[in-house]
């Protein structure tokens, strides 16, 4: 995928290797994608595929071992600590476990005000009014919750507080890492709707990381599928779900459970589990579980190439509706 | 078609489970489980009645705190006796479980009723090889000797889809992946060929591809062994294609119970409908607005007057806040029960059947 100048966030050849004994765990190996302004990019995959590490290394919470992360025209890899802190005010992260991401002994108001206090951008009445506006925007009553301790809030309320805290500096980019997976269905729907509203209201660009395919489809404009540290397929949400080109995407979709008693989809159930990232398979990493794997798959890793407008896939033998095979040129 | 409500007190004797033989395997009647807490009694299960046929799969669906897990443990009489008050009756295969002596219960656990828990790492003993964890119940209940039990364990591991069982039988739980551990849990549960298998969130925490494998395995094992299954989950997707009937729980009560197709197609209780419509679906286009229900479930340590869902219910009337609705059967289907004063008319059914006729 080529780097476009109008992308708010551009991730190029991102690599993250964790040291583990003598071996390295290749959590992310060569991931490239762009996120455009005002867009929601969904990042989906099974546990261990590197989606969370990708999100964290965009924020530079994990130092990438290779590649570049360009946010708003500024390269973040290799920035000095002071400059990085400044750059990070434009990008914020919301984490999976809403309860453990807040200090239980602090009051909701102080939690949301903290970023303002750190930067000293707003004080006094202005600070109070900003925090109250933010609490109101995430659907909490400022009078009722301001003096409440985080430990007194339910999971859904904590997630709303986390979102308020992340938005108080008016970031351009929001990275959401499994923000609804710990919530009940009815609360999950509230938070997903809230995210859509806030995105429009504050003109946010969102990277939405999750394992739940239905949730990702609901919020995303484009979806990127990851497997064992690499991107398999990137496409507009509706395209990806209606005509997956990568065998892994197709298998993932067929395994997903839809809340409907009438199953119209053909079931292809994958056997086995993903191989270890310590010693990933050669060539295409999915080949050990792929129903259409051939010799070429073991020899060379397929590059992510565009097979249709905005639809890219990394596969030597992508699935096509018309049946014509598309071969990777590399 | 309007689903009116004729008031019928739930009497399980009058509602044999259609199509699953006349005598049910399990009859739960007005079961209450109350915990004593510093804040007063907490009614986790508040008057639940249902029956389960031999070879039937019942899905119990509810959000966290709805009492679904406590219900499944109450059925097995697994809860500690201290600080827990249990009334009502659970008759399993003709035997009363509530208040039964511990010795009698121990003879049933693992032999006739088995359970698969949510977190296999917590349910398995981390310092005992899985082989011994499987043979334990075989030797205790079936009185097999060590060699017979080991042979049986190897065959079970093979049946639940574990490759090279003769190597895996000597593994410790930490050496297995999450999916494999859950397969081992299922092997342990199936060891003595139980009549009833309770699976409490058996696939929560597993990846989608592994989740599908485990659920298929459960269905396959049930068909082979002719046992009844209670599948407890928060995820409607888990039970949608796998349960014969679904019971929806809210605030410790069953608010609707019916055959799976009816729950989805002829939803009567507004809470069930809310649950269905707030679940994101792959079949919907992206950016489909979810019908979220405001608020959250009530605090069970505070006594509830009227219908527990009334405060969040779009069709609530004055009566709902005063008088609790009883479980009532639908006019056209005596096995479809719901607890609601203002049931949804059939015309507003969930649009899941848009693909036309299907099996």
Image: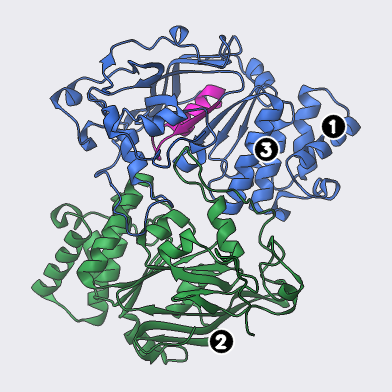
Residue B234 to residue B343: above or below: below
Q: Residues within 10 Å of mark 1 (few under 14, many from 20)?
A: many
Residue located farthest toward the top when viewing the structure as drawn: B13
Q: Are marks 1 and 3 in contact (CB under 8 Å)?
A: no
Judging by the rendered image, the residue that carries numbered circle 3 is B186
Q: Are marks 1 and 3 on the same chain?
A: yes
Snapshot quadrant of residue B314: top left
Left or right of B67 in this view: B147: right
Q: Are marks 2 and 1 on the same chain?
A: no
Q: Nearer the viewer, residue A310 or A205?
A: A310
The residue range painted magenta reads B57-78
Q: Are marks 3 and 2 in contact (CB under 8 Å)?
A: no
At 28% across and 21% down in the image, what residue appears?
A: B3
Q: Are marks 3 and 2 on the same chain?
A: no
Judging by the rendered image, the residue that carries numbered circle 2 is A66
Question: Which of the chains is blue?
Answer: B
- The CA distance from mark 1 to mark 3 is 16 Å
| SS at mark 2 in the image | strand
Q: Nearer the viewer, residue A72 or A154?
A: A72
Query: Measured from the top left, where is residue B329 in percent x and y?
Result: 35, 16
**Which chain's residue wears label 1?**
B
At 51% across and 41% down in the image, what residue appears?
A: B238
Residue B20 to residue A164: above or below: above
Dot 1 or dot 3, earlier in sequence = 1
Question: Which of the chains is green?
Answer: A
């Amino acid at each position: 995928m080529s780097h476009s100048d109008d992308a708010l966030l551009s991730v190029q050849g991102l690599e993250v290797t964790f040291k583990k004994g003598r071996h390295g765990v290749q959590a992310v190996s060569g991931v490239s994608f762009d996120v455009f302004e005002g867009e929601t990019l969904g990042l989906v995959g099974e546990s261990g595929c590197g989606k969370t590490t990708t999100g964290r290394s965009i924020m530079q919470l994990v130092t990438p071992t290779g590649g570049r992360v360009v946010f708003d025209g500024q390269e973040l890899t290799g920035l000095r600590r002071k400059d990085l802190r400044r750059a990070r005010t434009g990008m914020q992260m919301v984490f999976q476990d809403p309860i453990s991401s807040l200090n239980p002994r602090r009051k909701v108001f102080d939690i949301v005000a903290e970023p303002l206090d750190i930067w000293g951008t707003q004080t006094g009445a202005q600070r109070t009014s900003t925090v109250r506006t933010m609490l109101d925007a995430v659907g909490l009553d400022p009078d009722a919750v301001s003096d409440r301790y985080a430990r007194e809030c339910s999971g859904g309320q904590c997630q709303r507080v986390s979102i308020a805290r992340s938005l108080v500096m008016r970031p351009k980019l929001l990275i959401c890492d499994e923000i609804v997976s710990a919530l009940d269905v009815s609360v999950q729907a509230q938070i997903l709707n809230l995210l859509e509203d806030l995105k429009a209201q504050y003109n946010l660009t969102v990277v939405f990381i999750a394992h739940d395919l239905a949730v990702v489809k609901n919020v995303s404009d484009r979806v990127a599928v990851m497997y064992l540290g690499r991107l398999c397929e990137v496409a507009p949400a509706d395209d990806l779900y209606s005509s997956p080109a990568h065998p892994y995407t197709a298998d993932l979709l067929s395994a997903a459970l839809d809340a409907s008693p009438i199953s119209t989809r053909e079931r292809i159930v994958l056997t086995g589990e993903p191989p270890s990232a310590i010693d990933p398979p050669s060539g295409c990493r999915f080949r050990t579980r792929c129903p259409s794997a051939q010799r070429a798959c073991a020899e060379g890793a397929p590059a992510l190439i565009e097979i249709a407008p905005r639809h890219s896939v990394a596969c030597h033998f992508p699935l096509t509706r018309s049946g014509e095979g598309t071969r990777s040129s590399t | 078609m309007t689903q009116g409500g004729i008031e019928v007190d739930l009497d399980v004797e009058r509602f044999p489970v259609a199509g699953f033989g006349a005598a049910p395997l399990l009859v739960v009647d007005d079961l209450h489980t109350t915990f004593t807490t510093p804040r007063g009694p907490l009614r986790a299960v508040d008057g639940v009645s249902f029956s389960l046929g031999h070879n039937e799969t019942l899905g119990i669906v509810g959000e966290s705190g709805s009492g679904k897990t406590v219900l499944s443990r109450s059925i097995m009489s697994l809860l500690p006796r201290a600080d827990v008050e249990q009334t009502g009756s659970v008759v399993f295969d003709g035997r009363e479980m509530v208040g039964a002596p511990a010795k009698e219960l121990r003879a049933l656990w693992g032999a006739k009723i088995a359970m698969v828990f949510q977190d296999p790492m917590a349910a398995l003993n981390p310092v005992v090889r899985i082989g011994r964890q499987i043979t334990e119940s075989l030797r205790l209940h079936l009185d097999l000797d060590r060699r017979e039990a080991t042979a049986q364990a190897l065959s079970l591991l093979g049946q639940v889809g574990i490759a090279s069982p003769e190597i895996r039988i000597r593994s410790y739980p930490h050496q297995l992946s999450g999916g494999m551990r859950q397969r081992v849990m299922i092997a342990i549960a199936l060891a003595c060929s139980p009549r009833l298998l309770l699976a409490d969130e058996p696939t929560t925490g597993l990846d989608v591809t592994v989740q599908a494998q485990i659920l298929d395995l459960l269905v396959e094992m049930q068909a082979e062994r002719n046992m009844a299954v209670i599948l407890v989950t928060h995820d409607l997707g888990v039970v949608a294609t796998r349960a014969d009937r679904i019971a929806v729980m809210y605030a410790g009560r069953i608010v609707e119970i019916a055959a799976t197709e009816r729950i989805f197609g002829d939803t009567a209780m507004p809470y069930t409908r809310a649950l269905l419509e707030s679940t994101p679906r792959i079949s919907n286009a992206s950016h489909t607005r979810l019908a979220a229900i405001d608020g959250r479930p009530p605090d069970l340590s505070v006594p509830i007057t009227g219908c527990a869902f009334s405060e969040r219910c779009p069709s609530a009337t004055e009566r709902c806040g005063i008088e609790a609705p009883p479980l009532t059967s639908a006019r056209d289907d005596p096995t479809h029960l719901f607890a609601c004063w203002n049931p949804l008319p059939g015309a507003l059914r969930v649009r899941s059947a848009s693909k036309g006729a299907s099996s």
